[in-house]
Amino acid sequence: MTDNAAAQTGPTPLTLLGTGAMGTALARAWLTAGHPVTVWNRSPARAEALAAEGATVAASAADAVAANRLVVACLLDDASVGEALDAADLTGRDLVNLTTGTPAQGRSRATWAEARGARFLDGGIMAVPPMIGAAGSGAYVFYSGSAALFEEHRATLAVPAGTTYVGADPGFAALHDVALLSAMGGMFAGITHAFALIRPEDIAPKDFAPLLVSWLTAMAPMAHQAADQLESGDYGKDVVSNLAMQVAGNATLLRTAEEQGVSVELLSPYMDLMERRLAGGHGDEGTTGLIELLAGR
Ligand SMILES: NC(=O)c1ccc[n+]([C@@H]2O[C@H](COP(=O)([O-])OP(=O)(O)OC[C@H]3O[C@@H](n4cnc5c(N)ncnc54)[C@H](OP(=O)(O)O)[C@@H]3O)[C@@H](O)[C@H]2O)c1
């Protein structure tokens, strides 16, 4: 097994498995910063552009892993990581998995990698490819797993995007990633419903969009109040819009949707939870207590 890291000084050489949209952006960022990069992709044609930009293209995933101690995987899903690395010798490697997965997949992939002699760090990328390597884009990656690996490669990992280490549990990066993506889903659902409401009218979407953005931006800090309530265990702490008032207001939202000919299928699951919590005698709280219903308590 060769190991470029032992023979070189300067920017750490690394291997990148997977040159899809995200893998290509990552490889470009490291190449631009002067890191020697060995790439492998299941379909070789997709790695050709990077060869022209200075990357070394390995013939197999096993060869790519053999080339460098630091190995980054950015493949479609957890199963593809297992397939790609099936025949590779991971002994002494530092495997950083930037493939999106679940917390349980992160934990079992860590056990799998460690049993093969590697240190393991899981990552969840909070960015789209154009944000990678772009100064000021706000791109970052959640990391969890081996703290020693993270500390040793921190500077290299910080090249394509910011780094946020969230703990030794290898499932935590995925959990943070998925929690933020899930919150985003709720936000996009709300945006979709709002545009559906105005669409039948003579209201320019381009005039409406800034209003939507500033309202959502103003409301987003309510997450801090929810955190405060969860930590204190008091769901009624500092509530300014209580559940009883909000449920009464929901009738207006539902009626407006009906008047505009818009389905309420994006809104009603959340409203149903609010009504259940109110019926349970929690009208003085805000909405943080809905977590109890989601958790089946
Ligand atoms: N794109 C984004 O906006 C974004 C944002 C955050 C996180 N991510 C995550 O980044 C990862 C890669 O995404 P991407 O955008 O680069 O996707 P992509 O463009 O579809 O690329 C998928 C990559 O996985 C490879 N692959 C798929 N199945 C494989 C298998 N069984 N064995 C080996 N390789 C396999 C593909 O190889 P072939 O070329 O041979 O098909 C390709 O290199 C995903 O986990 C994604 O969730 C993406």
Image (spheres, rainbow, N blue to C red):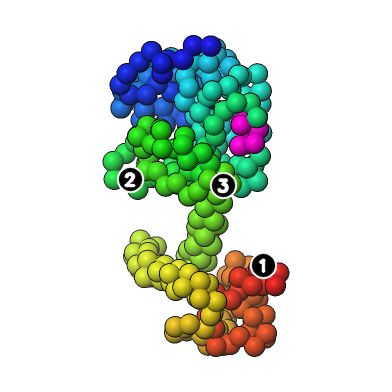
The spot of residue 29 in percent (x, y) is 36, 30
Query: Which residue is disc 3 drawn over?
Result: 169
Q: Is residue 110 magenta?
A: yes
- Measured from the top left, where is residue 20 in percent x and y? 50, 29
Identify which amino acid the numbered label 2 is placed on.
Ser
The structure residue drawn at horizontal position 43% and vertical position 69%, both measured from the top left corner, is 224
* Kind of residue at badge 1: Ala
Mark 1 sits on what residue? Answer: 295
Sort mark 3 into few (<14), some (14-19) or many (20+) by Cα contacts within 10 Å.
Answer: some
Query: Horizontal and vertical percent for residue 62?
Result: 58, 17
Residue occupying the point 54% across, 31% down: 119
Q: Assign a secondary structure to mark 3.
A: loop
CA gap, disc 3 to disc 1?
22 Å
Between residue 180 and residue 152, name the one nearer to us: 152
| Residue 80 lies in quadrant | top right
Left or right: where 75 falls relative to 14: right
Q: Secondary structure at mark 1?
A: loop
**SS at mark 2 in the image:** loop
Q: Is residue 17 magenta?
A: no
**Magenta span of residues:** 109-114
Amino acid identity at mark 3? Asp
Query: Which residue bears the numbered disc 2?
Result: 137
Of callouts 3 and 2, which one flags the residue occurring earlier in the amino acid sequence? 2
**In the image, what residue occupies the spot 53% across and 16% down?**
66
| Above or below 52: residue 175 | below
Q: Nearer the viewer, mark 3 or mark 2?
A: 3
Label 1 beta carbon less than 8 Å to ligand 1: no
Q: Is 160 displayed left or right of 191 in the figure?
A: left
Q: Nearer the viewer, residue 148 or 240?
A: 148
